[in-house]
Amino acid sequence: MTRRALITGITGQDGAYLAAFLLEHGYEVFGFVRRSASAEFVGARLKWLGIYDRVTLIDGDILDQASLIRGVRDSQPDEIYNLAAQSFVTSSWRQPHLTGDVTSLGALNVLEAMRLEKEHARFYQASSSEMYGLIQQPVQTEDTPFYPRSPYAVAKLYAHWITVNYRESFDLHASSGILFNHESPLRGIEFVTRKVSDGVARIKLGLADKLSLGNLDAERDWGHAKDYVRAMWLMLQQDKPADYVIASGRTTSVRAMCDIAFRHVGLNYRDHVEVDPQYLRPAEVERLLGDPSKAKRQLGWEPTISVEAMIAEMVDADLRRHKHGSVYG
């Protein structure tokens, strides 16, 4: 029988790539979607991947328990992937209550809907490396203590632990992926990687001259979203649920990322990048570096796309976007 999957956050970067991956593996894919005034952009990423007409979208809101229950009842999923969140860290200081509601209580609502309607389904929670925050160990594993440094990270920590709690309380097959930074041409323009790739494209095409950023010395463990959604799926194919760090095991600073991106189009980042204090975080996370040993050992997962290849792909996509006026390149 064809397996079914329900994805919250299907219209985001990870949701779109995950939907494409599952379709390739023969799944029937359902997406839980909150309708908004900008409805014409809701399926832009799915359309960019050429799969918009191959998924079934269900209207609802993860803060509306009744609509979640109906969504699970209607889709009867074998696997549920909770990717919905207010996921932009900077905005979480400006909208802390919204971030807390959507990112933390939203996960609880999805778990509760599954427990009530499809308790034998398998559940994936999108946890985040931002939960480590003020790092307690130089390399972060599944056992590293958390020290969140933003409302977003605090909300993600609640979602992470409520997933553990439901797994242990109700014997649910519920796993969390502690994903380190992962990007692609489908990343939102507000995120630093896409801001850099878009800025490089604009400068190369003569549409801008400067790119304003925040902390250039912040270091992150970056990978490609395509690799990371594969890890999500692998977690739900295991006999027993567990939590896994998904990372490349390599750090790159924002400064080095700028260097890679500008060199890709034959420019020097020093001629164009400037620091603007408005982009500095109230509480900075200086460095994150994940150890994916458990995922490699138990899931057989390894990243296949380097940070250099990812950045080049993003710059090329933004060059096409500005040349042709498309949304995602």
Image (cartoon, rainbow, N blue to C red):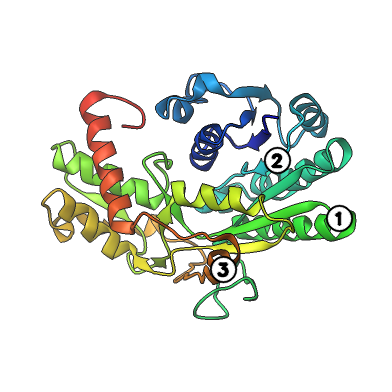
Q: Label 3 sits on what residue type? A: Arg
Which residue is farthest front? 1
- Sequence order check, earlier mark of 1 and 3: 1
What residue is disc 2 on? 79
What residue is disc 1 on? 171
Structural distance between the alpha carbons of marks 3 and 2: 23 Å
Q: Is residue 62 above or below residue 152?
A: above
**Badge 1 vs badge 3, beta-carbon distance below 8 Å:** no
Structural distance between the alpha carbons of marks 1 and 2: 15 Å
- Residue 127, horizontal then vertical, whole percent: 62, 56
Q: Residue at x 51, y 72 (%)?
A: 291
- Sequence order check, earlier mark of 1 and 2: 2
- Residue 240, horizontal then vertical, whole percent: 74, 59
With 187 as the anchor, is 299 left or right in this view?
Answer: right
Dot 2 alpha-carbon crowd within 10 angstroms: few under 14, some 14 to 19, many 20 or more: many
Q: Secondary structure at mark 1?
A: loop
- Sequence order check, earlier mark of 3 and 2: 2
Q: The C terminus is located in which quarter? A: top left
With 185 as the anchor, is 161 left or right in this view?
Answer: right
Q: Label 1 sits on what residue type? A: Asp
What residue is disc 3 on? 297
